Amino acid sequence: MVDFLAENNLCGQAILRIVSRGNATIAELLRLSDFIPAVFRLKDKNDQQKYGDMICDFSYFKGPECYERKLEAKPELQDLDEEFRENNIEILSRFYLAFESVHKYILDLNRYLDDLHEGVYIQQTLETVLLNEDGKQLLCEALYLYGVMLLVIDQKIEGEVRERMLVSYYRYSAARSSADSNLDDICKLLRSTGYSSQPGAKRPANYPESYFQRVPISAPFISMVIGRLRSDDIYNQVSAYPLPEHRSTALANQAAMLYVCLYFSPSILHTQQAKMREIVDKYFPDNWVISIYMGITVNLVEAWEPYKAAKTALNYTLDLANVKEQATRYAASMESLRPQVQQLLKEGFLREEIILDNIPKLLNCLRDCNVAIRWLMLHSAESAYDPNNKRLRQIKDQVLNDSKYNPKILFQLLLDTAQFEFTLKEMFKQMLSEKQIKWESYKKEGSERMTELADVFSGIKPLTRVEKNENLQAWFREISKQIESLNYEDSTAAGRKTVQLIQALVEVQEFHQLESNLQVCQFLADTRKFLHHMIRTINIKEEVLITMQIVGDLSYAWQIIDSFTSIMQESIRVSPSMVTKLRATFLKLASALDLPLLRINQANSADLLSVSQFYSGELVAYVRKVLQIIPESMFTSLAKIIKLQIHDIMEVPTRLDKDKLKDYSQLGARYEVAKLTHDISIFTEGILMMKTTLVGIIKVDPKQLLEDGIRKELVRRVAYALHKGLIFNPKAKIQDWQSVYQSTHIPIPKFPSVDESATFIGRLCREILRITDPKVTCYIDQMNTWYDLKSHQETTNNRLFSEIQNTLGTFGLNGLDRLLCFMIVKELQNFLTMLQKTILKDKAVLDAFKAMLAAVNPVQGIVANASKVYATAVAKTQKIWGAYLEAIMKVGQMQILRQQIANELNYSCKFDSKHLAAALENLNRSLLADIEAHYQDPSLPYPKEDNTLLYDITAYLEAAGIHNPLSKIYITTKRLPYFPIINFLFIIAQLPKLQYGKNQGMTCRKATDPVDWPPLVLGTLTLLKQFHSRYTQHFLALIGQFIRSVMEQCTSQKIPDMPSDVVGALMFLEDYVKYTKLSRKVCQLSPC
């Protein structure tokens, strides 16, 4: 018969692919559960107020049109909704695909069962597949994995969160218009069950059986799977655990599968007492806490509470006498096993001959250790007992008391067992690889000894007092031939024959009185020894390694091992060499990867790499977490050294009186520094002792671990210092997983917000904006200084940015510049939204703009009765200029700050890295020249779309301050009606608030109505820069026309002095040309 898993067996391959996909789907669900956007939980009041109208559960489907109309009625909600979509559509799509794969899994399983029933697979039915060992395993796994998926989803992704994510995905994606979309079915399967994983939460009625029955599955299939799990040892695990007391451990994985599958047939749990008693007696006679998949633990006392038959059956296990008996038994095991394992681990004890002679004893010791560790870890785990359940508390207290539970002793046994297991495995692998070579070597030695003895009895070779004996000569030659004929491939026959040869050599020594000749006796003894070695060597079988792998399974501790982290770290702090034993424990934990990867590997699935990387990455992250205590301890010691050197140890002067030498020696403090320095070196040695280790599929290099750990601790401490230090007391969102600056291994820590800023850089930026606020300060460009409007005292100057660079470095100052850049983008976007949705929707204001446009056309002409026309237009539009001015001033203020930062960066770059500065300037000029040449002659080269050169060089230029913030395009814009007129009216509306002085230039007329000139000019300039240049030309033409018209009126009315508004307009043009570096011809042409 064809092997069930053979590539040409379609029936076997189909179910194998389904099971493989099931394991991959669970890995994806576990991976995604760490990336649920917090906003979908709506736990924060700010989130509820901001997003409450946009994020909705399945109640949305009762009236989606009404819901969408509500959003459309508020323009600000529409903008927020669009921003939310852009930020979250990627992660929502990933979650949806995972949910869809769960639904597809059960559909494919049902289709497979239908195909079996209809005879699609020739000669295969459900019954015949269940008779095959592999088929039986795969069908049981298929049902079990579906149950695990549903439980994982409910445990890791709460029902309400699922619903909100599915509704958001439905709204934001094209799935609703897709004909083949399964969205409705997925929503029905994954709608909220009411279950909550929070301690003390009430369990919903009929949970989880009603959840498991949302997609119907063939009842005969469920019944047959449960029947097989009840009666068979489907994985043949009992052979690895021969002792009856270990049977529940041997069948632990099968018990977990049965636990999950029983929810598909709740009648057994409710009413079938005989079956439940049989299940409990076989699988749960001495345990009630089980691991169902990759360390997800379940306490049967709580899980089976609503089911009468299950609860009654389990009561026998939970009888106080039985609980006490089990706990006492494992307490006794712990006491006897610890010294036993420690003895085995003594240097030089585990030798090859000891192992070969005591394989059964060593395996028994391993079994006892692993069984004891498993029972105690599971039954003492905090996560397995709900603190609000009185009965569970009582059982837990009894277990802890009767087992004399001590987590440190249990952890020590785990460490020793892992080390013993690792050593034994490595030695056994070595012996297995050398098995044939050694066996052949022993055979050759034995054969040669017999040949030599035959030669001795031939009388040819002289050996003291040995007479010629042809019979013995012939006999020894025959024995030599027999030894030579032993065949390594036929180990059973060779072993039997070797035993007979040993017996024959013992008998020949007795019957022929050869004891008198010591040399002959020695030859015979050596040969017997070699034959004995051959028997032991032939008994080195791979089955022993397989047994060790089965017995050493630690997958149940995948999550609860975290409760021992503090003990691990404390033991490393006390003895850094402990890392070597921990390495063995981590490798033992890595064996848990075998469970989900086995079927994926068998199916040759492309998911193998991603699933391996996920679980390996989880384990490596845990290794890093445990070993982070070393960098932490190093920095603690360094902090003490710094404290001693700064505060305690006095600086020795160049000249020192002899009698004061003792005072300056400070031997105690210096000894303490030396001791702390030595401690740091010991910690470093400790982590390097771990050696390069393959954890799953990820290679862990201890040097890299140490470096990453030190960097992580340094980042944490620096970030904390800046977080605490940069707190002031005045009166598009990127997710962590999307950020190029955030790292899994060396994360930038998050601290609770003290204001609207997420980090210290944000707080610093807002504080700078506060102290340079144009409403309370006046910026004098020639002096690069801000003065207080009321007191006229200096507030700050450009030295501020030198201080920031000295404190935060170039990267910190560059980061501040980038943040200001994003704030300008946000401000401009908000400004344009306000312009389009309020100003351009106001009929009275639009009429004023139309009238003004008619009055000034053509711009080359003179406006008649200029003062009245301009004053009327300004008066009619007065109400819009408050918000307009505030936005322009903010942008201008931030542009001044960006200019100052660019100057500081450029200065320090030229000073500290003159070659880099020169290279960047030359490269920049060359690129610009090439691009200009290309536009003049398109046949010349130009960087292609996929070439990142311009993007990359921009980052370098900005970091070196070789850029002009005023020439940047911050946002993309569309054509706007009346835009030049609006900006022109805005400028002339502000001119009366300003006055010109020969020394200070344009300054604010009244401190109560503040307008700062440089931010006003730069803000207007930046705004116009975002639009087509013809808007700027039109705007400048209007300014020129204003100057000409007012001056014409003054001349005709014989007013000798130039009006202040005209002076202001001229100063605006002057400064505009200066900042934009345009030719003065622009201004000369504008008024013409």
Image (cartoon, rainbow, N blue to C red):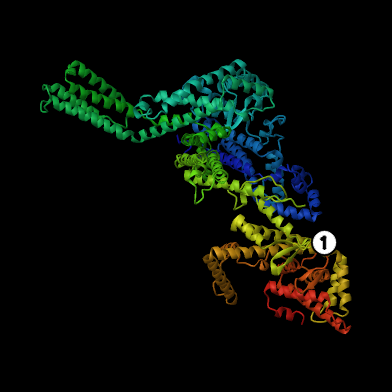
Q: Please tell me whether mark 1 sits on a helix, a strand or a loop.
A: loop
Q: Is residue 972 above or below residue 219?
A: below
Pick the front one: 864 or 121: 864
Where on the picture, by quarter, is residue 1050? bottom right
Does residue 587 appear left or right of residue 179 in this picture?
Answer: left
Query: Quarter-wise, where is residue 376 in the image?
Result: top right
Q: Residues within 10 Å of mark 1 (few under 14, many from 20)?
A: few
Q: Amino acid at mark 1?
A: Thr
Quarter of the C terminus within the rendering: bottom right
Q: Position of residue 799 (x, y in %)?
A: 65, 61
Residue 525 visible, this orientation: yes
- Residue at the (22%, 29%) spot, across then down: 447
> Quadrant where the N terminus lies?
top left
Q: Which residue is mark 1?
A: 838
From this viewpoint, is residue 12 visible?
Answer: no
Residue 512, horizontal then vertical, whole percent: 17, 17
Return the residue nearer the eye: 107 or 205.
Answer: 205
Residue 703 higher or lower than 856, as above or below: above
